[in-house]
Amino acid sequence: MAMTAHNSSNTPTSALPTDPIAPIAVVCLTQRALPMAKRIAASLQGASVHGLRTRVSTNDVDVAFDDTIAHLQRTFSSDHVIIGVCASGILIRALAPLLANKWQDAAVIAVDEAGQTFIPLLGGHHGGNRLARDLAERLGGIAAITTPGDAMLGLALDEPPKGWKLGTPETVKPATAALLAGASARLEVEAGSAAWLTNSALAQSDDGTILITATAREGASDDAISDTAETAITYHPPVLALGVGCERGCPIDDVYELVMETLSGQCLSPKAIACVVSIDLKADEAAVHELASRLGVPARFFDAQTLEAEAERLVTPSDVVFAETGCHGVAEGAALAAVGANGKLIIPKHKTKRSTCAVALSQHDIIPETVGKAQGKLSIVGIGPGQIGWRSPEASELIGRASDIVGYQMYLDLLGPLIDGKDCHHSDLGAEEARARHALELAATGKDVALIGSGDAGIYALATLVFELLDREDRADWNRVAVQVSPGISALQAAASRIGAPLGHDFCAISLSDLLTPREDILRRLQAAAEGDFVIAFYNPVSKRRRDLLAKARDILLAHRDEDTPVVLGRQLGRPDEEITVVPLSKLEVDMVDMLTTVLVGSSNSRHITRGENEWVYTPRGYAKKGPDAAKAPVLSTPNHRNTDTPANDKAE
């Protein structure tokens, strides 16, 4: 079955990348503010909408909360950027007790409901000013920047462009103060694309007292005149490509220590490294990714053909390496490929017994996203039955991060603006293998892919198919993909939650579809579950052509449990036309059920009760057997307790 691809976008341009300040919580307190909150979130990768439960439709938000102050404080403390579509005073009063300093506090931005003004309240130099400007430009508003450097100098000296690293953070404050007082700057650009400095509104002169240096060298500020050293600023532009190679399973400390010793020996700053690069055979090598993580840069990979094209520029070509990899040099070749034809190798291959490294210098800033390709990522995401409030934050984050979304069209429609601007790929309902295969193919090219399923991705869903394909085909490019499974609320959990606690004791799940499972196996499992007195969740209870297995299941169960055993029918769970029905087992008819129905059949102990206006089904766990003393055990109260730590296992024994 062929896949159909399209770009899902209700906005003129794709979502803004928010690294390194994500995750982002867009908070709204009224239904009137919700449309702007959703526009903001749709404009940002990895953003989620948080709404006050009593005033905002919970079906339209990713996270619903009850206590505004507590939620803001909890979100801020978990290092989320907060964009509040609300009065700034609310944000200030909530967060004031938690403030540390401007180097630690996450960005907080206040936005009016019309989206006319974006005000960075906190973390202006921690990404807040930049984010406010980007959003204002994107959504047609104004960024109200109040930090003196931005307002008067036209740039924030402690917030250089993406990829640039500040080597002397301690000198920025006195340097900014001197520049605001009328001092001029003297720029020394040894490396990097420094137009953001040279073309800025900074007062500049050849004898300026504020020395600003752009260099790949370590300790460049030591060259500053002693009486101006306290105001000398050093930046490290992203101009170095670090090529690495290593044995499979190489310890991270081996390659990390090699790299740091190599850089130190040549007086180069690790802050000038733009990316760690290697051959694609190492795309799943843990040491390479950990090295990149420690250096705070991406890892990128080239195929052997691309590296072999650099053979004439290699200093230490190796026939042994060629025999193993198809290129004559991994570390040197990757570094040279990253900097292009105009770049040069400045540190030839250094090595230990298990790893190698080399460094190349680019004439311009290296943009890692244009270098080679990333390790492909495949997130197999269960989005639950469909209600936004039932989707996990992790699921929303993985979908928001992904560049490509693969799934059945009905499931993609449930994601709404979360997938705006992304490349979406869909196929027919029965084409599960086509979707899983397509997702793996996309991820193998270096893309970040989310494969979407309803309910839980690992329960009668696509996760098992992905792993079956990996097992069956054992393709090298697929094996290098980073695969992650993100759980979701399953249909059996959703159905149970709507009617009480029918799964309170031992239960099992059985699919009645005989497309993939022989009918005799299904009947054998039905018989065993009936004899074992399990609560049973039936998936795929009927189809257009298969109408008899549910009736057979009912008859088998009636031979082992009472005819009044409660049966819960949950249809379109978590969606606007949701229906929950309870019938006795003996009254269960096939026509009561369709393909969108989950069926829960109680055990011999399950009870169907009516209390007040409420109807419940539950299966006793046996707590009454503990005796009356257990019910009289003291319960301790702690007023206004804010510690959210909970035991790792709170299951009752």
Image (cartoon, helix red, strand yellow):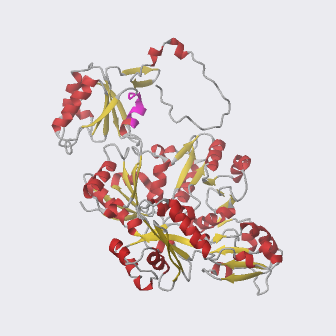
Picture residue at 52% right of the left edge, 36% below the top: 648
Examine the structure image and report whether residue 501 is included in the region drawn in magenta.
yes
- The answer to whether 273 is drawn above or below residue 598 in the figure is below
Quadrant in the picture for residue 109 = bottom right
Given residues 221 and 596, the one toward you in this image is 221
Picture residue at 68% right of the left edge, 30% below the top: 639
Dominant SS type (magenta): helix
Given residues 141 and 197, the one toward you in this image is 197
Examine the structure image and report whether residue 516 is included in the region drawn in magenta.
no
**Left or right: 131 as drawn, with respect to 322:** right
- The answer to whether 309 is drawn above or below residue 641 in the figure is below
**Left or right: 232 as drawn, with respect to 292:** right
Q: Position of residue 340 (x, y in %)?
A: 47, 82
Start-end of magenta stretch: 493-503
Work out which residue is located at the far top of the displayed protein and give it.
628
**Left or right: 14 as drawn, with respect to 295:** left
Q: Taking the image as drawn, is residue 420 in sight?
A: yes
Q: Position of residue 547 (x, y in %)?
A: 19, 37
Check the picture and name the quadrant holding the N terminus.
bottom left
- The answer to whether 567 is drawn above or below residue 200 in the figure is above
- The answer to whether 67 is drawn above or below residue 34 in the figure is above
Q: Taking the image as drawn, is residue 551 in sight?
A: no
Q: Position of residue 557 (x, y in %)?
A: 23, 25
Q: Position of residue 20 (x, y in %)?
A: 58, 62
Given residues 288 and 120, the one toward you in this image is 288
